[in-house]
Image (tube, rainbow, N blue to C red):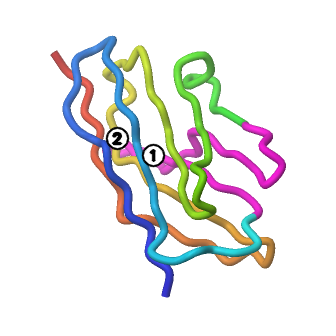
Amino acid sequence: QVQLVESGGGLVQPGGSLRLSCVGSTTINNIRVMAWHRQAPGKQRELVADINSGGSTNYVNSAKGRFTISRGNAKNTVYLQMNSLKPEDTAVYYCNIVSRFNTAYWGQGTQVTVSS
């Protein structure tokens, strides 16, 4: 079974940057979309950014201009560069990969805390 492993989370001051990484344990074929979601305490999980097989990207309004999603050279790798972080970005961030057959894979999550 494919496992997604996220890394790169941590504690950062407001205005700082973090780069999240997600790597699959094995190659995932027929990927339709790769995405990052987040869930803050007491809130529903929300889509932060995604990138489809054609390279088109989509961002939640609050992330536009600050976050960048990208794919790695390996087919099962995706990154999220987060700049100008704000306290409201504090959440657990989850990697998500969906195949063309709508099989969804999720990582275990990585904590991002933005605080002075």
Q: Main secondary structure of the magenta part?
A: strand
* Amino acid type of the residue tagged 2 in the rendering: Ala
- Residue depicted at 39% across the width and 35% down the height: 19
Q: Hey, which quadrant is residue 40 in on the image?
A: top left
**Badges 2 and 1: C-beta atoms under 8 Å apart?**
yes
Which mark identifies residue 38? Answer: 1
Circle 2: element type: strand
Looking at the rendering, in which quadrant would you find the C terminus?
A: top left
Measuring from the top left, give residue 69's x and y in whole percent.
59, 37
| Picture layout, residue 32 above or below residue 13 | below
Q: Earlier in the sequence, mark 2 or mark 1?
A: 1
Judge the density around disc 2: few (<14), some (14-19), many (≥20) Cα neighbours within 10 Å: many
Q: Hey, which quadrant is residue 65 in on the image?
A: top right
Judge the density around disc 1: few (<14), some (14-19), many (≥20) Cα neighbours within 10 Å: many
Measuring from the top left, give residue 94's x and y in whole percent.
44, 54
| Picture layout, residue 115 above or below residue 58 | above
Q: Does residue 55 appear to the left or right of 44 in the view shown?
A: right
* Amino acid type of the residue tagged 1 in the rendering: Arg
Q: Is residue 53 magenta?
A: yes
Farthest right residue? Answer: 54
Residue carrying label 2: 91
- Residue depicted at 63% across the width and 32% down the height: 60
- Residue depicted at 71% across the width and 57% down the height: 33
Q: Hey, which quadrant is residue 18 in on the image?
A: top left
Q: Does residue 46 appear to the left or right of 28 in the view shown?
A: left
Q: Does residue 90 appear to the left or right of 35 in the view shown?
A: left
Range shown magenta: 32-57
